[in-house]
């Protein structure tokens, strides 16, 4: 069968996999191939056990796979055969050299650009999907055109705004799709090709275009604004705990102002995920590079409050549990950075688990989807850590439960049964404010939510 377009995506991760599955699902007339250098990942994409958990993903992958959606390790061949290449490789924070701990590590991305240049035999549109520092598209264009082999590359920026756990919904019905291009005739022509792809299922008014740098910057700024809301409410949660106010009541009152809006105001143990911290630090690095110290400091504050919130959570536990956690069994309810995903990147649970081990506590971790990743995250930590799928079994014999992830199942458990099985006095630290605190208190627990007075029997 011949297809209208051959689309390639380099990088079969949390962004590339679901995004390409959605394009293949919505556009049977296109052939979509996703390649990755990691053969294990590709094997998983070709199996029933996908490498990532996302509600609704497996259904659309299974329907399109082998029809117009293909997963492969043949990067070279994929490059040769495609007219449009999405680049969706990882761009973690640099851990070495200049900008370590701040700037994006562009080695995978740089390598990809060189691979594309080497194996291309015809003109291509390159779509930057990974979140990248501003002006990366320009750098990519320079690498690509440096071969001077007569092949034309037009680079577009098309940041992905999907959130994990709701990726399929976000891809199917996005608030907006943003496409940045150079404003030349060729750049605008390439942009229109990408607009046409998205137009297969997204209304025209939701597809917005801009210059390439605005597009790159918008992604960093969108994440910085979202994270800033969480740090803002988390900073207020600390004040509420001191001042006997209730952060949920405050958030409700503030969020009902339509200028503020009610979403993303849930106080928590801190935000996690692969994007927020990385993108803010990227923004901070960019501001420092341009000598905008005040601007850089302002945004860095968002990350600092998040670190403070996580540390505050541990210090609260320590203080409330009679200033020692040594040898106490503490159960973490959830390890994923949010509900409905198995992803644990930058999860506050990693920090909390490590700090508990430093305090010589015995840590029991339960999570419906993230135990494998939790084991990887903590493999180098010397201490007593166990991983138990069943929350009842996990919490039995523990002195405290700390809710790390807002999985719905944790709201539906039989806490009378859990209370009976725990060491006394029994504590619950609800790092997500998802439980019925009054009810737990009546059962006998000492309950400590975020940003509200604790309920204690002594
Ligand atoms: C984020 C952006 O939302 C998305 O647009 C972007 O493309 C990638 O980064 P993601 O990291 O997948 O998505 O999840 P998100 O829902 O934004 O949650 C991030 C973190 O903030 C999670 O740890 C979550 O639990 C926490 N959070 C979120 C809060 O603590 N309180 C809130 O009110 C909302
Ligand atoms: P994201 O959350 O941005 O999607 P992931 O880490 O989940 O990031 O996915 C990025 C993927 O890109 C990984 O599976 C990695 O193996 C892949 N990758 C990195 N460099 C290359 C490359 N040069 N060619 C193909 N795939 C690559």
Image: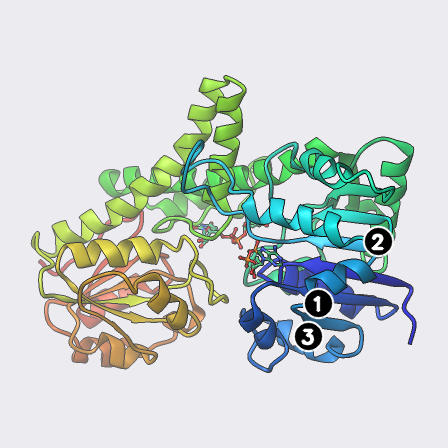
Residue 34, disc: none
Query: Residue 109 at x, y = what percent?
Result: 61, 47
Q: CA distance from mark 1 to mark 2?
A: 26 Å
Q: Secondary structure at mark 1?
A: helix
The earlier-in-sequence mark between 3 and 2 is 3
Q: Nearer the viewer, mark 3 or mark 2?
A: 2
Screen quadrant of the C terminus: bottom left
Q: Is residue 330 above or below residue 313?
A: below
Q: Is residue 437 above or below residue 109?
A: below
In screen coordinates, is 44 left or right of 314?
right
Q: Quadrant of residue 143?
A: top right
The earlier-in-sequence mark between 1 and 3 is 1
Q: Is residue 200 above or below residue 45?
A: above
Q: Nearer the viewer, mark 1 or mark 2?
A: 2
Q: Which residue position is annotated with label 3?
A: 61
Q: Which residue position is annotated with label 1?
A: 21
Query: Residue 290 at x, y = what percent?
Result: 54, 19
Query: Residue 318 at x, y = what percent?
Result: 14, 52
Screen quadrant of the N terminus: bottom right
Crowding near the residue tagged with mark 1, few <14, some 14–19, many ≥20 C-alpha atoms within 10 Å: many
Mark 1 and mark 3 residues within 8 Å of each other at the beta carbon: yes
The answer to whether residue 179 is visible is no
* Residue at 40% in and 46% down: 249
Residue 121, disc: 2
């Amino acid at each position: 069968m011949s297809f209208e377009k051959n689309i390639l995506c380099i990088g079969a991760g949390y962004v590339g996999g679901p995004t390409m599955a959605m394009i293949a699902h919505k556009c049977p007339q296109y052939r979509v191939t996703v390649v990755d250098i990691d053969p294990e990942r590709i094997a998983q994409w070709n199996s029933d056990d996908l490498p990532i958990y996302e509600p609704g993903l497996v259904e659309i992958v299974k329907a399109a796979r082998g029809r117009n959606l293909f997963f492969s390790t043949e990067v070279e061949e994929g490059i040769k055969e495609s007219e449009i290449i999405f680049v969706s490789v990882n761009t973690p924070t640099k851990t070495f050299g200049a900008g370590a701990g701040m700037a994006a590590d562009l080695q995978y991305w740089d390598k990809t650009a060189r691979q594309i240049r080497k194996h291309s035999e015809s003109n291509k549109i390159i779509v930057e999907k990974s979140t990248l520092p501003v002006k990366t598209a320009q750098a990519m264009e320079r690498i690509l055109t440096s071969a001077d082999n007569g092949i034309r590359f037009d680079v577009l920026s098309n940041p992905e705004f999907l959130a994990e756990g709701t990726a399929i919904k976000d891809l199917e019905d996005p608030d907006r799709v943003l496409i940045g291009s150079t404003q030349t005739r060729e750049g605008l022509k390439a942009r229109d090709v990408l607009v046409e792809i998205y137009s297969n299922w997204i209304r025209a008014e939701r597809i917005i275009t801009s210059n390439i740098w605005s597009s790159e910057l918008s992604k960093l700024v969108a994440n910085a604004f979202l994270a800033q809301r969480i740090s803002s409410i988390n900073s207020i949660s600390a004040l509420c705990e001191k001042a006997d106010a209730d952060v949920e009541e405050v958030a409700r009152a503030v969020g009902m102002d339509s200028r503020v809006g009610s979403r993303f105001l849930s106080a928590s143990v801190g935000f996690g995920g692969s994007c927020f911290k990385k993108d803010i630090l990227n923004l901070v690095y960019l501001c420092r590079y341009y000598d905008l110290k005040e601007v850089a400091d302002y945004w860095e504050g968002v990350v600092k409050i998040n670190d403070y919130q996580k540390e505050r959570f541990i210090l609260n536990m320590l203080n409330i549990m009679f200033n020692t956690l040594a040898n106490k069994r503490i159960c973490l309810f959830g390890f994923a950075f949010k509900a409905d995903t198995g992803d644990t990147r930058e999860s506050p649970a990693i920090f909390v688990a490590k700090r508990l081990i430093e305090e010589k506590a015995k840590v029991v971790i339960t999570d419906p989807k993230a135990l494998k990743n939790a084991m990887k995250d903590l493999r180098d930590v010397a201490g007593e850590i166990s991983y138990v799928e069943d929350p009842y079994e996990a919490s039995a014999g523990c002195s405290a439960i700390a809710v790390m992830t807002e999985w719905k199942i944790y709201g539906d458990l039989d806490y009378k049964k859990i209370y009976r099985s725990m060491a006394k006095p029994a504590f619950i630290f609800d790092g997500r404010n998802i439980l019925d605190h009054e009810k737990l208190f009546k059962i006998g627990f000492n309950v400590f939510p975020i940003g509200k007075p604790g309920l204690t029997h002594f």
